[in-house]
Amino acid sequence: MPTTPPYLSIAAELRRRIRTGELPPGSRVPSTRAVTREWGVAMATATKALAVLRQEGLVRPEPGVGTVVVAPADPDAAPLSRERLVAASLELADAEGLNALTMRRVATALGVSTMTLYRHVPGKAELVRLMTDAACGEVPLGPVPADWRTGLEQGARWLRAVYRRHRWMAHAMASFTRPVATPNAMAYTEWVLRSLRGTRLSAADKLHAHLLIFAYVQGLSMADDLEEQARQDTGISDGEWMEQNEPRFDAIQAGGSYPELASVTSEGGFGLDLETLFEFGLRRTLDGIAALIDETSG
């Protein structure tokens, strides 16, 4: 007889604990490290076991807490609306990433059948578009500054903040040739172009300046999303990962074949921080646009 894979056996036991109340709603389930210790399995097996429970909608990652048991749907909750659907989808994608967003998972979170969702949206693509529009409409940009540089900087920081709240959006809006068409996303583009209205840049240069900053912010934000997914998948923090891999980097560098790399990483130490990189790159990008504006004004 075929044997049950270890990860399914672990998932079944944790499912039992949840259903019997041994692990009540809101409580933390064992981490991947705790699972490896209790069942004597590899980290990958523990990760797959917890992934099964996430796919069933029984648990979800809680930033700063860990993986917790999801409370059952409230039978007295208000009837399903498109707004409730979008809000629940945002919560799920924010916690677990866009790959975890399925119509079935959203239906489980809302306590309705999957087919009920299709009364409000035709499918996942339209749901993601509505989520993107809602995320872009959370915080208004405010008045357009008189100074173009202040405007572009403010717009970049606004976009960075949107991506920080909703890391999955960087991948959802990754295509330039097939952009996500939503009123609030277009309002951001309009706002940025108005910031450049007083310059002598051509229409093409204005649009390119906007897309350049958009691509820069998006690229760093995609790195944020990938790092968060890695933390969820492995259960290992960035610091723990570096601690495990630092000996390998040191061993390669010790050969003496990378003197420049050794010099910049050894002088006072060097820690890669995406926020520091964001500030550096934003200043340099705006400096380049300033040089172009000077050329056109000369």
Image (tube, grey):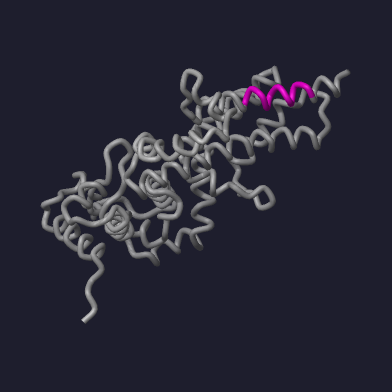
What quarter of the picture does the C terminus occupy? top right
Side (left or right) of 255 relative to 191: left
Residue at image position (74%, 26%) is 289
Side (left or right) of 243 relative to 169: left
Above-or-below relation of 52 to 34 = below
Residue at image position (73%, 25%) is 288
Residue 199 seen in the current view: yes
Side (left or right) of 53 relative to 216: left
Side (left or right) of 237 relative to 138: left
Q: Quadrant of residue 145?
A: top right
Residue that lies at the very extreme toward the front in this rendered image: 255
Q: Position of residue 46 (x, y in %)?
A: 27, 55
Range drawn in magenta: 282-291
Q: Position of residue 93 (x, y in %)?
A: 42, 48
Secondary structure mostly seen in magenta is helix
Within the magenta stretch, is there residue 287? Answer: yes
Residue at image position (37%, 56%) is 106
Q: Position of residue 32 (x, y in %)?
A: 26, 49
Q: Position of residue 226 (x, y in %)?
A: 47, 45
Decide which of 125, 261 is in the foreground and name it.
261
Above-or-below relation of 213 to 44 = above
